[in-house]
Amino acid sequence: MTHSAFPPRLYRTCGALVIACGVIIGALTAHLPDTAFATGGRAMAHGAMEMQMWQGLALVALGLGAERLSSRLLRIGAAGILLGALLFCGAVYYTAFTGHHAGHVAPTGGSLLIVSWLCLALAWARGA
C-alpha cells in the first residue's frame, strides 16, 4: 500500500471521472448550437477538453502505478495534476460558455499543471 493519504483507487477513480466529464464536454462542444458559446468559445472548450482528457489519462496511469508513489514529489505531482486540471479546464469552460474571464484561475491551474509535471519529472529522474 502507498504511503499517500490519497489511495491508488482514488487516483484511478478521479482520473476516470475527469475523462467521463471530458467526454461529456466533447459531446457538448460537437453538438451544441453556436449560440451556446461565447465568441470563439467552441474552439476554446474543445482545447480545454483535450487538456482535460490527457490529464485524466495521466491520473489513471498514476493510480495504476500508485504502489510506486512512495516519493513525496510523486504524490505532490499527482495531486497537483488533479487540482490544476480542474482549475484550468473549469475556468476555460466558464469563459467559453459565458464570454467572461474567471480572473487568474486558468493561469493558476495551468501553472499548477506545469509545476506538477516538473515534480513528476524530478521524482522520476531521481529514480522514484
Image (cartoon, grey):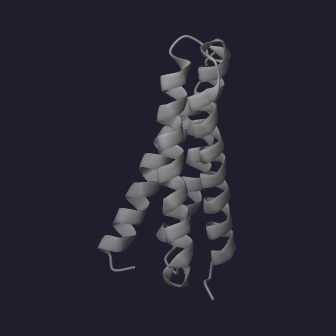
Count the numbered circles shown: 0
Q: Is residue 77 left or right of residue 117?
A: right
The structure residue drawn at horizontal position 35% and vertical position 72%, both measured from the top left corner, is: 124
Direction from residue 11 to residue 49 in the image, left or right: left
- Asked whether residue 107 is in view, the answer is no
State the residue at coordinates (56%, 31%).
Answer: 30
Left or right, 12 with respect to 77, comes to right
Give whichever of 35, 65 is nearer the camera. Answer: 35
Q: Give the percent coordinates (x, y) of residue 105.
A: 60, 31
Q: Quadrant of residue 11?
A: bottom right
Locate the C terminus by quadrant.
bottom left
Residue in view at x 60 percent, y 15 percent: 34
Residue found at the very far left of the displayed protein? 125
Q: Is residue 104 above or below residue 22?
A: above
Image position of 76 with respect to 30: above or below: below
Question: Which residue is at 66% across, 26% downward?
Answer: 94
The N terminus, quarter of image: bottom right
Q: Give coordinates of residue 10: x percent, y percent.
A: 69, 69
Residue 32 seen by the camera: yes
The answer to whether residue 5 is above or below residue 78 is below
- Residue 4: where, in percent of width, then height? 63, 76
Q: Position of residue 14 (x, y in %)?
A: 66, 61
Nearer-the-camera pick, 116 or 54:
54
